Amino acid sequence: MGQEPDRYERRRRLLAELGRDPVRLVAARVPPHEAVLDVGCASGSFLSLLSGARSRVGVDVDARLVGRARAEVPGATFEIMDAADLRSLEARFDVVTVLHTLAHVVDPIAVLQACHDVLTAGGTLVAAVNASGHLREFWEAVGDPLEREDTDTPQDALLNLVGAVFPGAGLEIVTGRVRAHREALMILADTYSVPASQVERLDRHLESTVEMGTWDVTTRLGIVSAVRSGVSRATMSATETA
Ligand SMILES: C[S@@+](CC[C@H](N)C(=O)[O-])C[C@H]1O[C@@H](n2cnc3c(N)ncnc32)[C@H](O)[C@@H]1O
């Protein structure tokens, strides 16, 4: 096993720090006393914030992450499961969350249809994606390695996707600030295969900018929500909160 699990865990925790505040903002939108299913739950960090829920179930295909979730969030139930197979769960849910996950599944429409079928009538689907402008300062410093053509923004693409299964889905944009550690930003650069020359540019920038090893960066989250009946409960207009 060697250092690998520790290194993996450190990377996971540092990256999770970058997303912690946006995840809290989603958690704050889930009313207490509901039965909640989190699809693509990873190590359960979102469900750990919902201690007021009536019941909490998380599913993920990654057995290692589900093992961590079981150890770290004892009040919830976790299953190793493909999101397309949700209907095999016995329970039905008032709230189904799919956070930063639809881009990773083979057939997102099939997953959304499965989410629809495990919601109670009037239950709420909440999906989230990093919106354009997320970690803006970071991408400005390294240069965006992804050739972004004039296609839909990630949040519009998510709205269209969810809207195909849940008519009346609504989009809310939430903006915040997070204190990012230099190491987390370097891991992020590695994760996105930012070329070495651009990483050097980031490093120089961080040397001149970073105070006490941290850097405040902008977070932007696109939250799409809809109810099973097809009538949106979401705030339809974009909302900016700092
Ligand atoms: C980017 S992570 C997001 C994790 C967490 N929801 C969050 O917001 O931090 C995507 C997660 O989806 C899981 N995943 C990918 N494909 C899946 C599938 N077909 N069924 C269930 N989970 C899946 C991955 O294992 C991973 O934990």
Image: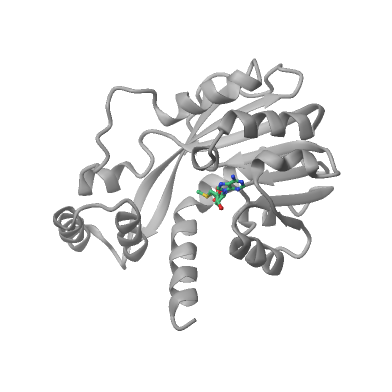
Please state the horizontal and vertical placement of residue 45, each as a whole percent of the image.
62, 57
Residue 157: image x %, image y %? 46, 25
Is residue 60 left or right of 32 when viewed as pictured? left
Q: From the viewer's perspective, is residue 239 above or below residue 95?
A: above
**Badge count:** 0
Coloring scheme used: one colour
Residue 6 in the image, given as x and y percentages of width and height:
48, 76
Q: Can residue 230 be seen from the camera position used here?
A: yes
The reply, left or right, for residue 89 in relation to residue 111 is: right
What residue do we see at 52% from left, 45% from top? 22
Would residue 28 be visible to someone looking at this image?
Answer: no
Residue 235 versus residue 132: which sits nearer the camera?
132
Residue in the foreground of this view, choosing between 37 and 176 = 37
Residue 18 vs 122, above or below: the answer is: below
Relative height, residue 103 to residue 70 (above, below): above
Which residue appears at 19% of the width and 63% of the height? 207
State the image coordinates of residue 238 (x, y, percent, origin top left): 50, 23
Residue at the outermost bottom position: 2
Q: Residue at x 40, y 56 (%)?
A: 179
* Residue at left offset 46%, top offset 24%: 156
Q: Which quarter of the picture shows residue 29? A: top right
